[in-house]
Image (cartoon, coloured by chain):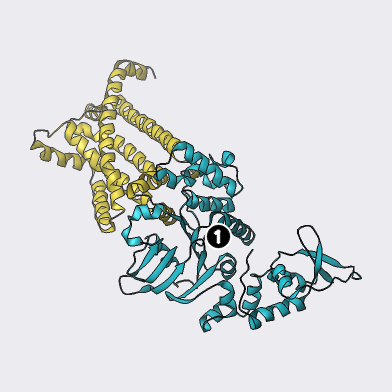
Amino acid sequence: MITFDHTTKTYEGGVTAVNGVDFTVEKGNIVVLLGPSGCGKTTLLRMVNRLETISDGSITIDGEDSMSLDQIALRRKIGYVIQSNGLFPNMTIEENVMIVPDLLGWKKKEKRERFNKLMEMIGLSGEKFGKRYPHELSGGQQQRIGVIRALAADPPVMLMDEPFGALDPIIREKIQDEFLQIQREVKKTILFVSHDIDEAIKMADKIVLLRGGEVMQYDTPSEMLVRPKNEFVREFFGKDRAIKSLSLHTIKTLQEVIGLANIDDTIEDTITIHVRHDLRNTLSMLLNQEADQVVVVDDDDNRLGAITIDLVQKYLHFEIKAKPTLVQKG
Amino acid sequence: MDKWMKFLEVNAPRIFDLAIEHTILVGLAILVALMIGVPLGIYLTTNDYLAETVLQIASVMLTIPSIALFGIMIPVFSIINQGIGFVPAFVALVLYSQLPIIRNTYTAIKNVSPEMRDAAKGLGMKTSQRLLRVEIPNAFPIIMAGIRTAVVLNIGIGVIAAYIGAGGLGVLITQGISRGDNYLIISGSIAVAILAMIADGILLFIQKRYTPKSIAN
């Protein structure tokens, strides 16, 4: 758990980068710091592991004031992932990943075991990649290595500074999914900086939207999309925020809430879609007019019903107007 | 050609001895220069104001004509009765090699990417660990380039040391000039050039051998 209490950062010369920020990252949650460039999100992140000093207020990690801890010991207890070039080119992949365990004085055998386990998590062979150097890996693989390096000594807290920002969209999405999968297993308390709204909606349990070093809104992604607190939040998420919010819901939730349409067996031009597909992609598919009927199937290929644009719209109306949000992810 | 063979037959052992003397003088000067220059270069990366001053002083040192610098050493070291010979030559060579060593070390460490430095700090490395594990290994090729420049420079300038009685291959050249003996001048010059190439070759080998593969290109 990370608690920000009136946390403030003022640079020499009086520029305030972070101004009186108050919020708590619950244990095992991902909180995304989101906002336009210069909003102080990276500064705020870097204050947690004291790469930036705290001018006023405090940051508490699992009940301990971060200023009361030794700076080096504090950083070794916090996983840290940055956008690019964070891997050391003079070290092999195994040496890179095992830096923190090495600094903490783990035994050779423990390190080897841990390395292989971490590599398994990201679907790479420790045997095959361990002795290679970072430049021999693709951008996506390097970023995965960056993530497991932060996880190496099993820190309770992780800081991620636009970790997937330098990747192309297809790889990025894949690694995001993979990371969420890992997170379900390891349940770290994560602070995640992003400037990408879609990424924030996808990754976050809660979003902190910042502007000029101040918190504009701290809420779940769906609350923020459906009930923006002020004009800035409304504008930031854009006119298509209703569509964006659809990515938080799956066909399954729609089925549970309003049910699916009946399948018309007379229509020949039919395609199928999996029930766990999110509604945003489903809507895009419907708008593409790829077929006259879209049939929803489950894991065993059972045909559950048909989905239409009308149904999605009805569901959206129900979500926004009729009832408090239900959060559904994955 | 016959004359050359005869000349070498008589003088080869002497040339060899002088080359050893030259190597010892330059080698010791470089060792001491490294012990001063590399740590100083690293320290300067933490103090920009001082860096500018020190680099300027080192630059000025290199603009002093070598024969003048050796000349200055004579009265200075006369105070401790070491006015001529090994000591003043050694000190002059140490001073001469400071600029390439300090400047390359400073630049190399400064050029380590900020992301890499940031990651090292963020992972909880102490300053010394960051230097030894990340910054110096990644700066190594540029630091080595500076050392190679210094070595070649010193082998050349070491010739002048003969004028203040420090021996070395310069002896052949100075004698050759005063006696009008071209064989001495040419053999001395070629020996210096070969020595410089051998030293540079060895250092280049070390540089390649210990440069992390992934930063070599």
Chain letter, disc 1 residue? A
Name which quarter of the figure residue A291 lies in. Answer: bottom right
| Pick the front one: A118 or B133 | A118
Q: Is residue A48 visible?
A: yes
Left or right for B63, reference A203: left
Residue B108: x and y in percent read 38, 49
Which residue lies at the image location 53% right of the left edge and 79% below the top edge? A233
Residue A161: x and y in percent read 48, 61
Left or right for A301, reference B134: right
Residue A305: x and y in percent read 81, 69
Chain identity for the colour cyan used in the image: A
What is the three-letter code of the residue carrying label 1?
Answer: Phe
| Pick the front one: A297 or A272 | A297
Left or right for B76, reference B13: left
Number of numbered discs overlaid on the protein picture:
1
Which residue lies at the image location 89% right of the left edge and 70% below the top edge? A267
Q: Is residue A40 visible?
A: no
Which residue lies at the image location 45% right of the left edge and 73% below the top edge? A39
Residue that mark 1 sits on: A164
Badge 1 element: loop
Name which quarter of the figure residue A251 lies in. Answer: bottom right
- Tell me what hue chain B is rendered in: yellow
Quarter of the picture holding the C terminus of chain A: bottom right
| Pick the front one: B71 or A174 | A174
| Pick the front one: A269 or B152 | A269
Quarter of the picture holding the N terminus of chain A: bottom left
